[in-house]
Amino acid sequence: MKVIVSEGAGFCFGVKRAIQLAFDTAKSGAGPVHTLGPIIHNPQVVERLAGEGVTVIDSVGGAEDGGILIIRSHGVGPSVYREIENRGLRMIDATCPFVKTAQEHARKLSEAGYQVIIVGEESHPEVRGILGYAGADAFVIGREDGIEQFSIKRKVGIIAQTTQSFENLSRVVLAVLPRVSELKVHNTICNATRQRQAEAIGLAERVDLMLVVGGKNSANTQRLKTLCEEKGVRVYHVETSDEIDDSWLEGARTVGVTGGASTPDWIISDVKKRLQEQGDR
Ligand code: SF4
């Protein structure tokens, strides 16, 4: 059995940067270190950081006095920055620069009188953060169907969650266009996402089975699974190599492996090793 790992699988630039900042801060010994939410959607990495003394808190109120708060790559809205300042906490801002750009576009569009539509998952922390800059009339939509339920102004600006697929963004743009007199679109899908998705799709087209590796709560990992499924190949989503069921591999001559932006390289290597061992039996 041949195992092919997609080139772009694993940590993206923004995630690498956030994790490095978290480990460096923990090692500096400058005080209690917290992350506002898990640093990435990967329980194994969160566990390693916990081993260094970094604790995850759900809200600014949960931080220890005199502590350091790390903002993860997903970013946060303006009200969170205000809260941190009011509490007098030290802050390490690991917001990915691509997410910062999306936040900036949302703020500028809103200030220029555009109603902002964010294409993405409403409950995702990145989207909730961007929404904080987008003005009171902004809304989030996951896909084009259902757009008719929203009251849409004549002047609209669209931006995307950085991990959306280009196809989904395009479909929403086409659905909004007939209802407005002016439409400004910022393609805020990040390059790492675009490349990863293109490679995963390309791989899914030439293998018998795809394994998508990553946290079950990782939106970009789930999207990779959906995109591969759309190619008609059998796809399984696993967090670690332990979840691989040998029966999945029966009859598969070529297996493709890809992983989300928050999937550590060591977990992808483990999966590859496990598949190769199975293939050698
Ligand atoms: S997926 Fe893109 S936007 Fe998100 S953290 Fe990674 S590089 Fe940044």
Image (cartoon, rainbow, N blue to C red):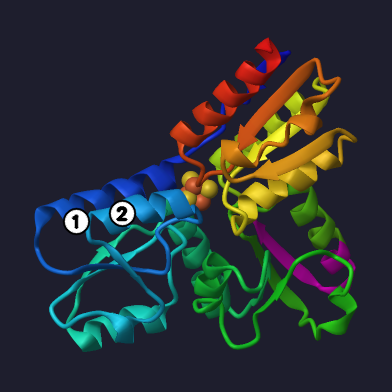
In this rendered view, identify the residue nearer to me: 148 or 85: 85
Residue behind label 2 places its C-beta within 8 angstroms of ligand 1? no
Q: Residue visible at 89% across and 68% down?
A: 145
Residue 25 visible somewhere in the drawing? yes
How many numbered markers are drawn? 2
Residue 210 is situated, as x and y percent measured from the top left of the image, at 75, 31
Q: Amino acid at mark 2?
A: Leu
Q: Residues within 10 Å of mark 2 (few under 14, many from 20)?
A: many
Under circle 1, the secondary element is helix
Q: Is residue 195 above or below residue 187?
A: above
Q: Is residue 118 above or below residue 81?
A: above
- Is residue 78 located in the magenta-colored stretch of the structure? no
- Is residue 178 located in the magenta-colored stretch of the structure? yes
Residue 82 visible somewhere in the drawing? no
Q: Residue visible at 86% across and 20% down?
A: 251
In this rendered view, identify the residue nearer to me: 261 or 136: 261
Side of 171 where 71 appears, left or right:
left
> Are the residues tagged 1 and 2 within 8 Å (C-beta)?
yes
Q: Which residues are magenta?
A: 175-186
In this rendered view, identify the residue nearer to me: 45 or 280: 280
Side of 164 where 43 appears, left or right:
left
Under circle 2, the secondary element is helix
**Cα distance between the residues tagged 1 and 2:** 8 Å
Q: Is residue 160 above or below residue 205?
A: below
Q: Amino acid at mark 1?
A: Ala
Q: Quadrant of residue 128?
A: bottom right
Marking on residue 26: 1
Check disc 2 and report the residue beneath it.
49
Residue 265 is situated, as x and y percent measured from the top left of the image, at 46, 33
